[in-house]
Amino acid sequence: MKREAIGKKLRFEVFKRDAFTCQYCGEKAPDVVLHLDHVEPVSVGGTSDILNLLTSCSGCNLGKGARPLDDDLAVSKQRAQLEALQEKREQIGMMVEWQKSLMKMDTDTVEVLADFWASLGRGFDSAGDGFLLMEKILHIERAAIKEPYLRDALYIRGILRRRFPGSDVGWEAKNILLELLKLTHDPESEKEYAKSTDSYWAWKDGAIKQIADLKEGSE
């Protein structure tokens, strides 16, 4: 039977599965040169799929020749490693689902709290600044579900307000920041820029120019 070529990707997957270790003698790379060995030889119908391949050092592979694998140890190791790989995949899948459920729970919590607060009516505003602050926080959290950079934009706007109290740092700054962050995806750099700029107007001009440059570069 003609031996089919084994690609680099498959070779790497087998070596990785076997921890770059010869499954016969236990020698590891780079101390030895590793080969791929067929559990069932090609000469008797063995295929070059991952289940029929294992890692062998050059000495063990060349010494084995085209004899069927009669050492059950290598097969057992291969089976155990495949089972471990499958278990890892299943656990990663479970972690992804868990993360999704946590994100859904956060979204549902914000929605429920916001709806409850709205049901109380504006008459509770007189109860004090605490009620207004809670309502504002819930409004921001709800909006942040759809605008992932909203919190960062408001934080950076707060930096600008503290640095330049005499300037009109309002909705315009927030909208500029949201547009900028969607292009840069780098809130930390924008925070540093806000801390180092000389004036609000200098920041505004620089941010608008940066947006224009980024849009031009993406065309």
Image (spheres, helix red, strand yellow):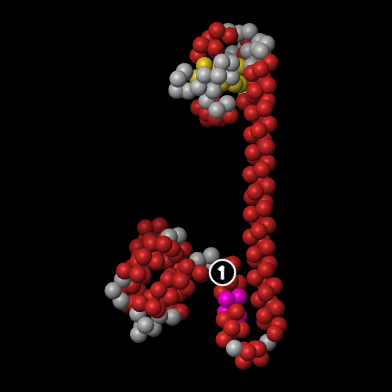
At a point 39% along the width and 65% down the height, the residue shown is 190
Name, please, the residue furthest toward the left.
Answer: 198
At a point 42% along the width and 71% down the height, the residue shown is 156
Is residue 138 located in the magenta-colored stretch of the structure? Answer: yes
User: Residue 91 placed where, x, y %?
Assistant: 66, 43
Q: Nearer the viewer, residue 85 or 43?
A: 85
At a point 58% along the width and 9% down the height, the residue shown is 64
Q: Nearer the viewer, residue 208 or 1?
A: 208
Judged left or right of residue 163, residue 28 is right
Judged left or right of residue 87, residue 198 is left
Q: Residues within 10 Å of mark 1 (few under 14, many from 20)?
A: some
Q: Amino acid at mark 1?
A: Ala
User: Residue 138 placed where, x, y %?
Assistant: 60, 75
**Quarter of the image where the N terminus is located:** top right
Dividing the picture into quadrants, the one containing residue 76 is: top right
**Magenta stretch bounds:** 135-139
Judged left or right of residue 113, residue 164 is left
